């Protein structure tokens, strides 16, 4: 009887756990696959070198770089984060500020898929990957809604309505959101609402951020943000200094994602 390749079986077991369960630490994915951490670490390193997984910069968790559901229904978040990371790191180096990448994972839902935040005294919460910000009160949510056409915006807001958040519902029905989206369009960037500080995510200083949309072929797919402790800078000050640099980075990320999609389509 011909023997199977044990190493390949173990690697596939790790990949299966990541696609089924989502991003995970080394300890968690090794335990789920029933492997020693040292073995899992070597296999994950190989899978990463071959492009099957991505180790997230923000929190060190491993992400499968294959869609978790049917083709065309769910963005390949690991692959997008891998493509975008060099531009995020460059943006942080140039501006001296943390950069977040937020992606549209389904209608009405944005998720932070990568960030250059790092632990520092007096900084904001360093580990934000996986957090899903409010479309109504967050800078990325406002940037996305302002850049969306009327039909897409209505779909996003129907999702928000289903979440049944009283504060979000009041902002939408009372007209405050539409006024803010008009201001966002004039400014050219989304800005976090004053006092919006979701403690489930941000445990350091109160954060402030500005965001611009990433929209290859004018289709909003995600947002790029600069983040800092709220008391350190005014949003307008940061925008005046760095908005052009942010736009250049967003264009490069959009072009990289579009190019990867074209290459993938050509292989089918």
Image (cartoon, rainbow, N blue to C red):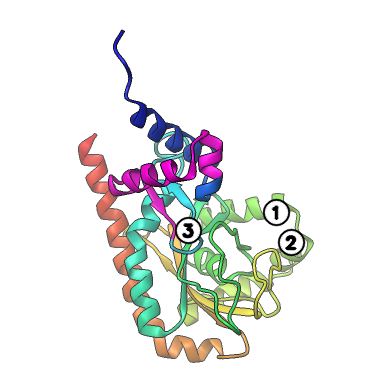
Residue 60: image tag: 3
Label 2, on which residue? 169
Image quarter where the C terminus lies is top left
- Residue 88 among those drawn in magenta: no
Residue 82 in sight = yes
Q: Secondary structure at mark 1?
A: helix
The answer to which of marks 2 and 1 sits earlier in the sequence is 1
Number of residues whose C-alpha sits closer than 10 Å to that of mark 1, classed few (under 14), some (14–19) or many (20 or more): some
Q: Is 142 located above or below residue 16 in the figure?
A: below
On the image, the x and y values in percent for residue 138 come to 60, 69
The magenta stretch spans which residues?
28-56
Q: CA distance from mark 3 to mark 2?
A: 36 Å
The answer to which of marks 3 and 2 sits earlier in the sequence is 3
Q: CA distance from mark 1 to mark 3?
A: 34 Å
On the image, the x and y values in percent for residue 247 come to 36, 75
User: Which residue corresponds to the image point at 75% horizontal and 58% vertical from the top-left?
Assistant: 165
Front-most of residues 159 and 77 = 77
Label 1, on which residue? 161
User: Which residue corresponds to the image point at 26% horizontal and 43% vertical from the top-left?
Assistant: 264
Q: CA distance from mark 2 to mark 1?
A: 6 Å
């Amino acid at each position: 009887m011909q023997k199977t390749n044990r190493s390949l079986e173990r690697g596939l077991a790790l990949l299966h756990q990541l696609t089924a369960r989502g991003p995970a630490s080394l300890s968690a994915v090794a335990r789920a696959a029933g492997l020693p951490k040292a073995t899992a670490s070597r296999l994950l390193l190989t899978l990463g070198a071959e492009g099957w997984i991505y180790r997230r910069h923000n929190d060190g968790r491993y992400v499968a770089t294959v869609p978790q559901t049917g083709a065309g229904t769910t963005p390949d978040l690991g692959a997008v984060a891998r493509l975008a990371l060099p531009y995020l790191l460059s943006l942080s180096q140039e501006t001296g500020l943390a950069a977040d990448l937020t992606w549209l994972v389904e209608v009405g839902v944005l998720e932070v898929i990568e960030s250059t935040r790092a632990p520092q005294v007096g900084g904001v919460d360093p580990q934000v990957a996986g957090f899903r910000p409010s479309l109504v009160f967050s800078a990325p949510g406002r940037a996305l809604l302002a850049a969306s056409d009327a039909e897409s915006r209505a779909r996003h807001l129907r999702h928000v309505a289903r979440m049944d958040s009283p504060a979000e519902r009041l902002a939408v029905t009372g007209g405050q959101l539409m006024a803010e989206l008009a201001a966002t369009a004039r400014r050219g960037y989304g800005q976090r609402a004053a006092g919006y500080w979701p403690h489930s995510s941000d445990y350091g200083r109160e954060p402030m951020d500005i965001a611009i949309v990433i929209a290859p072929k004018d289709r909003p797919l995600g947002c790029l943000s600069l983040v800092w402790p709220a008391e350190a800078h005014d949003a307008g000050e940061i925008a005046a200094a760095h908005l052009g640099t942010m736009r250049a980075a967003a264009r490069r990320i959009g072009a990289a994602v579009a190019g990867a999609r074209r290459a993938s389509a050509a292989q089918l």
